[in-house]
Image (cartoon, rainbow, N blue to C red):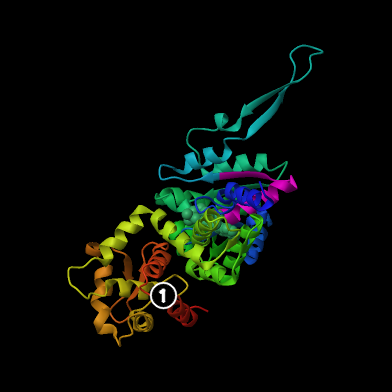
Amino acid sequence: MSAEEEAITQARLAVGQVFTPGSPVNERDLFSGRIEQFNFVLDAVTQRGYHAVMYGERGVGKTSLANVITSALDRSGKWIISRVTCDVSDDYASLWRKALQDVVLTRSRPGVGFNAEDTTENGRLVDQLPLELSPDNIRRTLIEMSSASPILIVFDEFDRISSDRTTTLMADTIKSLSDVGVAATVLLIGVADSVAELIEGHASIERVLVQIPMPRMSKDEILDIILKGISRLGMKIDQSACDEVASLSQGLPYIAHLLSLNSVRAALHLDSLLVKSDHVASGMQRALDQWQQSIKVSYYEASKSQQPGHIFKEVLLACALAEVDELGFFTAAAVRAPLRAITKKNYDIPNFARHLKELSEAGRGELLQRVGETRRIRYRFTSPIMRPYVVIRAVAENLIGKAALKQIQKTTTA
Ligand SMILES: Nc1ncnc2c1ncn2[C@@H]1O[C@H](COP(=O)(O)OP(=O)(O)OP(=O)(O)O)[C@@H](O)[C@H]1O
Ligand SMILES: [Mg+2]
């Protein structure tokens, strides 16, 4: 085998470990950007008496950030770390049982008899906890545990907890841990627009709860993900190909991984260690096929029409390219410019207001969420990964040329 063939084989074997749209990053070397958030979370969790909550859209990289932080603390060897993934069936007691399930208590008992030595006994802490747990039980347990090392407990996917009682008890726990300055920190993570959505009664703990919103990634951070991965594979990528993947990713690392994975595979399939625009084009096609079925179905529902010459696809694309606020909302006015650029027609709001309305209704898959009163109505894609899907599909179907796309993106993104 030639050196090049060997390199191609190695890259083929490794690409699925480097670009992982399905799983969070675990390795510091493959983690990009997020310096500000990293420091913010680290400061919060290491400061006694403070706790933290990290929230943001699905797939922006919350779990990945938590992973690199917990590994950094773990490496220091000074922390006890526990990670819990919440699910819908959890209540307060089950959450804490999960958090404490690996804790082993070692107790020594005095020996029986005059010269007998003391014996030590190991037992699982959870077996000794009462069935019903309260913030007070937890506080006392954590005080005992933290006498040796500080503790960090991460509750990921906290948005899945639907019971207000559970989140209220969690707020009470945080309050009570802070009040006595226990060396135990709680980090809550969840998909939400705001902390209020995640925790009932959060106002009572506002002072001790550091709030860390996770925004989409900047273009540079996304470029870094692509370049780090490509170089790890011993490959190269054309500047234009790299730019395409980055702008189609729309700040979502999940999409950057998905497109990079498929573009690299397309290049390797043609025995090339250099990824070019053509490979990105076929990678895009494969990525579209692999996209969540639910997204494909709602796109179909949204864009089908009996009438010839309808513009649902164009309106959808214009929505996907419209300028958004920090929560992902856009106005009808923001749809106008991209729609004109796509169709080369002078459409105005009355020409597509009906489309926006219908796209927010069940008949068209409720692709958009609609909020606000008349005149102040705003829209947002119900699923954040629908936006890149619409754009990538439009490019793949030639609904918009690459140059036109670049032009629109230049005017709508900072
Ligand atoms: N800083 C980063 N550097 C490189 N890749 C990242 C980074 N952050 C996230 N990713 C990648 O993006 C994808 C989504 O990341 P992750 O699972 O951490 O997001 P999340 O916000 O926890 O998602 P969810 O809301 O679904 O739980 C994964 O493929 C992960 O590998
Ligand atoms: Mg996650």
Furthest toward the bottom, the residue is 346
The residue at 26%/78% (across/down) is 353
- Between residue 13 and residue 299, name the one nearer to us: 13
Whether residue 55 is in magenta: the answer is no
Q: Residue at x 34, y 84 (%)?
A: 340
Q: Is residue 180 visible?
A: no
Q: Is mark 1 within 8 Å of ligand 1?
A: no
Residue 174 image offset from top left, x and y in percent: 56, 52
Q: Secondary structure at mark 1?
A: helix
- Whole-percent x, y for residue 303 in the image: 27, 67
Quadrant in which residue 223 is drawn: bottom right
On whether residue 66 falls in the magenta region, the answer is yes
Bounds of the magenta segment:
62-83
Q: Nearer the viewer, residue 24 or 164?
A: 24
Rendered position, 315 above or below 34: below
Please give the residue where the numbered disc 1 appears in the rendered image. 321
Q: Is residue 259 visible in the rendered structure shown here?
A: yes
Front residue of 404 and 204: 404
- Vertical relation: 362 (above or below) 351: above
Residue type, numbered disc 1: Leu
Camera-side residue of 332 and 294 = 294
> Percent x, y for residue 335?
36, 79
Q: Residue at x 28, y 74 (%)?
A: 356
